[in-house]
Image (tube, rainbow, N blue to C red):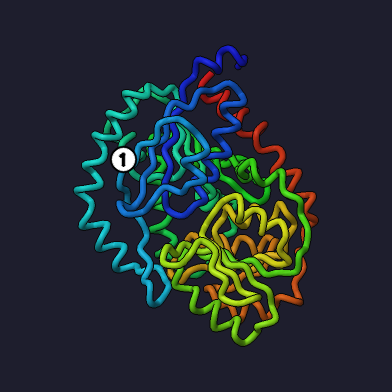
Amino acid sequence: MSQTQKQGRRVVFVVQGEGHGHFTQAMALFDILTQAGYTISGMLVGMKRRRELPKFFTKHSSVPIFRFTSPALLVDRHTKKISLWKTTLINALCLPWHLAQLPRLHRWIKRLQPDLIVNFHEPLIGLYTAWYRPKARMFCIAHQYLFLHKKFQAPSAHPWVQAIMRWFINLTSKGASLRLALSWYPLPPDHDQGIVVVPPLLRKGVYGQKVKDDGFLLIYLLNQGYGKTIIEWHTKHPSVRVHCFWDNKRVPSVWQYDDNLTFHQLDGETFLYYMAGCSLYLSTAGFESISEALYFGKPIMVGPIENHIEQYMNAFDLSTSHLGVATTRFDIEKLLEWMTQYSPEQNPDVFRVWVDSTPTKILSEIDSLIK
């Protein structure tokens, strides 16, 4: 497809607002598509009612952003794990409200008149597509589609939870012409599932960072409930320099607990700066930040939030691919026992070559989809 033909193609993004990974992926694809000549006419974001859009996302583009409420995982602040019963109950009670969002989605999409809808794992767009059958072609892109691939090595634990998760992943992609699975390593297409494996989508800020080792531990926690655990560990190891990013509006944007422990509010550019300079990266197994750490060649240790099946799958995948160290849950004591013993088995240059092919691979699939 020529550049002139692409300039007439309008694209709408639909983004699931759970976590920050889908936002950064949308930003990266926004840049790839606009540079290739496509026009992004708007973004629809599904998230919890009281949650705010991240500033790094709203600053990235001037296109209209429409918010709607969508199902979400609920975390118990005291136990710091996903509350399965609360997630199920609250989302079931809110189902009529969620279904009421479909006409709003329809009005926005009719107004934006897209030729292509790109869905970043938002479940309501699957229901919308099944109900309204829009004329625009749709493709879905997320790392979760890798879990449906016949070549993906899945853990044997929690089979019924995995079954529910796969049902949910299929729901997000109902009516899709193509599913792009973001992966840390290449796999052949799974034609039976309509899945093509592509490299991670990394935001533009990753590529301009100066990678170094400034001798500190970097921790990323979306759940502020783990802050107490970090402080307790730090009191036993006060000489270890730690920078921790979390989502806690009750404290200043930079909270200096003491000389060697600093807490930061989530900020995209600041986080990448510290990521590029850390000695070791520790997180709760979110796909996107692990991808960034792999690109920088940092040693990685992860432990998923308890009952978070996607993070559990990510941790298992990271470990079996020999890209990092993982426990079955977030246990900072256990993870940091290995801090001085671990080094990645894969040369980071191999991963960088894979990621650097992202624009070519994704554009090839999109061009063939709507030509």
- Count the marks: 1
Residue at 44% across, 45% down: 121
Of residues 252 and 244, the one nearer the viewer is: 252
Q: Quadrant of the N terminus?
A: top right
Q: Answer with the quarter of the image where residue 89 lies.
A: bottom left
Of residues 8 and 240, the one nearer the viewer is: 240
Of residues 174 and 235, the one nearer the viewer is: 235
Please state which amino acid type lies under the numbered disc 1. Answer: Leu
Q: Is residue 94 above or below residue 82?
A: above
Residue at 59% across, 70% down: 262
> In the image, residue 101 lies at what x, y percent?
25, 40
Q: Which residue is mark 1?
A: 127
Left-right relation of 133 to 25: left
Residue at 20% across, 57% down: 93
Q: Mark 1, residues whose alpha carbon is within 10 Å: few (<14), some, or many (≥20)?
A: some
Q: Quadrant of the C terminus?
A: top right
> In the image, residue 135 lies at what x, y percent?
36, 22
**Residue 177 in view:** no
> In the image, residue 19 lies at what x, y percent?
46, 55
Q: Residue furthest bottom?
A: 236
Left-right relation of 184 to 66: right
Q: Is residue 141 above or below residue 211?
A: above
SS class of the residue under badge 1? Answer: helix
> In the image, residue 180 lies at what x, y percent?
54, 40
Residue at 29% across, 62% down: 88
Of residues 329 and 226, the one nearer the viewer is: 226
**Residue 340 in view:** yes
